[in-house]
Image (spheres, rainbow, N blue to C red):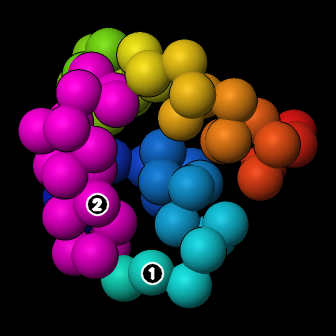
Amino acid sequence: MGDVSPSTFWYLELLPLSASSAAHARRTLTDRGQIEKAGRTAVQVIDALFADWVCRRFPI
């Protein structure tokens, strides 16, 4: 993960995924138009139905 702070990847603690699996999932969600890049490491959910599911699945 290079020089990036481990706290940048907090989402890896939510699900038992390897970093490569999480990266693949991120690419898939981007390709499907459910998320988009919002900076170097951040993403923004752009699919309203997916956003609703994420909020219910991972209440923060």
Figure label count: 2
* Residue range (magenta): 19-36
Residue 22 % position (x, y): 34, 66
Q: Quadrant of residue 30?
A: top left
Instruction: Name which residue type carries label 1.
Output: Leu
Instruction: Name which residue type carries label 2.
Output: Ala
Decide: is 18 above or below 35: below
Residue 57 % position (x, y): 77, 52
Callout 1: helix, strand or loop? loop
Residue 25 % position (x, y): 28, 60
Residue for point 28% across, 76% down? 21
Q: Which of disc 1 and disc 2 is earlier in sequence?
A: 1
State the predominant SS element of the stretch in magenta: helix
Residue for point 19% across, 52% down? 28
Q: Is residue 32 magenta?
A: yes
Q: Nearer the viewer, residue 31 or 8?
A: 31
Which numbered marker is on residue 25?
A: 2
Q: Is residue 52 left or right of residue 46?
A: right
How would you rate the neighbour count of disc 2 (Cα within 10 Å): few for under 14, some for 14-19, many for 20 or more? few
Decide: is 5 above or below 38: below
Mark 1 — residue? 17
Decide: is 39 above or below 33: above
Pointer 2 with pointer 1, Cβ within 8 A: yes
Q: Is residue 52 left or right of residue 26?
A: right
Residue 36 % position (x, y): 27, 22
Q: Is residue 11 magenta?
A: no
